[in-house]
Amino acid sequence: MWQPDRRPGRPVYRQIAERFERLIRQGELTAGSMLPAERKLASELGVNRSTVIQAYEELRASGLVVRTVGSGTRVAGGSASPLHPADWRTYLDAGTMLPNSDAMRRIRTGLRKEAGLVDFASGELSEALFPSETIRDIFAGQPYDGPLGYDDPQGYGPFREALAAFLSHRLRIATSASSLLITSGSQQSLFLIMQCLLRKGDAVAVETPSYCFSLPLLQSAGLRVLPLPVGREGIDPDDVERLHQKHRLKMLFLNPNFQNPTGSVLPAERRARLLAIAEERGIPIVEDDPFSLTAFDGRPPLPLKAEDPSGRILYVGSLSKIAASGLRVGWLAGPQEIVSRLADARQQMDFGMSVIPQWLAAKLIEGEAFDRQIGRLRRQLSERLDELRASLDFHLPGLVSFTPPDGGLNLWVKWLGEGDPRLMRTLERALSAGVAYVPGQVFGAEEASMRLCYARPEAGQIEPGIVRLKGVLAGGE
Amino acid sequence: MWQPDRRPGRPVYRQIAERFERLIRQGELTAGSMLPAERKLASELGVNRSTVIQAYEELRASGLVVRTVGSGTRVAGGSASPLHPADWRTYLDAGTMLPNSDAMRRIRTGLRKEAGLVDFASGELSEALFPSETIRDIFAGQPYDGPLGYDDPQGYGPFREALAAFLSHRLRIATSASSLLITSGSQQSLFLIMQCLLRKGDAVAVETPSYCFSLPLLQSAGLRVLPLPVGREGIDPDDVERLHQKHRLKMLFLNPNFQNPTGSVLPAERRARLLAIAEERGIPIVEDDPFSLTAFDGRPPLPLKAEDPSGRILYVGSLSKIAASGLRVGWLAGPQEIVSRLADARQQMDFGMSVIPQWLAAKLIEGEAFDRQIGRLRRQLSERLDELRASLDFHLPGLVSFTPPDGGLNLWVKWLGEGDPRLMRTLERALSAGVAYVPGQVFGAEEASMRLCYARPEAGQIEPGIVRLKGVLAGGE
């Protein structure tokens, strides 16, 4: 990063001020943008905070920034600039991709800013659960020998081979390398399906509550979203039949195993009925399956795809919830013609995925190292869930209800306390109190509820987090 | 990959037949899909070719496949299956992302299939030009210590810091980590700009010829594309003025340095006029700049962005043409509000990029290793261009004309031979003769022309490639 020149002759505060002046005049920092916090910038540059204050004061004196106690320093409105910075405002409203929801953006900002926050909000593993050592060993143990040029847009061949074996061995899914598309997490698979196989206005049925609603994906694609209520036993296949008769469903989006956020698993009898209806009505199913292998007892419920007799299921999975989300390695298994169409479209988006994480993933899912990872993960997730249950029972007795899942990362909690605590509104106070959750409303839930991810806080953080939550939720408004 | 069970008792040909039967009945292999070539499958499974033939014959006997001499074995039409495989056909026509052009798909298939083909078509570096050793050394020399969880959707912080320093040092672009968005190659930057900052029907001006036309990106976004003719000195700023008056341009897409495919560099006087017009008319510019650092003389022409006084330029770059395309590391530098909007949208597409290639890229662009890479690259590119020029002069004298560029990877060649050889139609014969080029029409060119990339064939392949090309082009139809 930029560093001031420390030789005598040019005061450091002037150099800092000049640097920001340049960025503002060039339009890199536009009207309203925040300058870095004084303390943070001082520590990054290795200077006294007073030096930064002096620089910011100088910028204020020239009318380039506005300083407000408590909320920091911002770039002043357009008039301060002698040039006419490009007016980008009209461009910001264009395009078809809607911005993320306010709640999710607020949570993300909170997580970035507040150190020490107990994070029940991010639906991912904590650092301690990633296979960090195995990854270091793989890179250190064998020279990188994957390709460095543009690769097959369907994904790195040896990884697809290894993955076909992995899916067959661990989840009894019969597939082949040529029926697999490697994507940047399951997110990209879902994006491609919605953008390339559906049209604006198409009716699709989505579990409700569902993490799908936390993303603007469905709305960005302009789909008509019909809710499939999820109970303890997942969705009711009769609802699918009913919705189809009324709306002619073009697709079902389901997460049958350890559903996010409820944790429910669709029972065998419902699966059979669901598949029969899909077969009879000709409705394709997108099965999102990030969690099966986390089953605490080591016996994962089989995915629907394991019994897909007619190529009706697009199966979407990833390493994000069982190894590490930062690898951004996901996949889609489906009929070859669909896979080629999506691979062709993804070439337009990003020209295919970096081979390096795929090279790593091929080694990560092979053999005993992965058994160890999954074994450790299952034990620790189950322990953390126990800690969370005990903390909720002890600190919020009679105020919450939940059904503990047998796998997955999330506990779905209903709020029973008197007076609707409007979990969406209390979120702001929770973030200030050092604890984050996702309000049920974000997932499309109607009643007061929230998703608590027990995989993200490290062991030992869970109880303190619930104590903070109690302070916010049970402490009165 | 799947392997037959070699213990006695179950004939291997039966196992192979059963495996394909399962894939066909499950709809993984749909009507019309090709089964692997006999010889290829035999070698992959380590069995005799006759075993594969026996298996395929059995599948044919059950009506599951159709075998045609010379064109291989395909899955039979739907009627052969006792189940009703999902009908995906209607889904394949939906969505807004158009498929890639036939010519480009044909070239890619050709490149995958024909071993020994001399590839003047792919616009990328050859294996020998990638910094393979440096990459191996980086991974071997220091344990991976980047994050493994979801990271900032704008990109890995330390890489953005390193990149800001790199852009300032090497190309005099003043930017900061917070004004940079890391993308999967420049392709993803362009996709995000077109999908998020523009609306259907918006008028944009694009250099013609331009590699942009080889991608369906512009049409997928529904933009009204207006051509800016490119001559030896790049585009004429007066054309921008003229187009704007008539169509009210919303954006300009330019590649001012070593333009792809023509190799032209926009001269200083035209730059100044262009920027003045963009300033006066309020037209933002997307500057795609993959090649500047390849300047053979080591003195790259400065990007427009180096003199962007009012934040009007979205600058797009990548490591693809100067290090390795398979890393998929690209970037966009622009005003922070635009960068955040695009980062937010990209979260919907793929939830951000894998950190590992970014961790690697941060180390790759720092210090002397990069100087060595660029030095070697410049020398070798310049040598290969010399070889290409000499070969063209010797083997196709009077039949081609070209202006050799001072950097970049591509030579733009006009065909002067009598009788229009319709370079689009001769492509098929060229692929059979073992040489690939991209016909000018793919780039939107009107006259007979083609792009020859001299970076992709290894040294020593260039002359034999041109000899083959002569056989096709000058040998009469």
Image (cartoon, coloured by chain):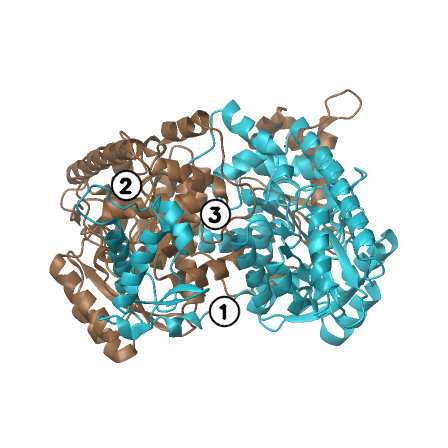
Chain colours: A cyan, B brown
Whole-number angstrom distance, CA of label 3 to CA of label 2: 30 Å
Residue sticking out furthest to the left? B269
For mark 1, give the secondary structure.
loop
Relative height, residue B206 to residue B106 (above, below): below
| Chain letter belonging to callout 2 | B
For mark 3, give the secondary structure.
loop
Crowding at dot 1, Cα within 10 Å, few <14 / some 14-19 / many 20+, comes out as some
Mark toward the viewer: 1 or 2: 1
Residue type at mark 3: give it. Gly
Residue at point 69% right, 39% down? Answer: A167
Nearer the N terminus, badge 1 or badge 3?
Answer: 1
Relative height, residue A90 to residue B154 (above, below): below
For mark 2, give the secondary structure.
helix
Relative height, residue A170 to residue A247 (above, below): above
Location of residue A14 (image quadrant): bottom left
Task: Say which residue label 2 marks.
Answer: B469
Task: Say which residue label 3 marks.
Answer: A352
Contact, mark 3 vs mark 2 (Cβ under 8 Å): no
Residue sticking out furthest to the front? A50
- The x, y position of residue A110, in whole percent, is 55, 58
Q: Quadrant of the N terminus of chain A?
A: top left
Mark toward the viewer: 1 or 3: 1
Task: Say which residue label 1 marks.
Answer: A96
- The x, y position of residue B327, in whole percent, is 42, 41
User: Is circle 1 on the same chain as circle 2?
Assistant: no
Residue at point 73% right, 42% down? Answer: A381
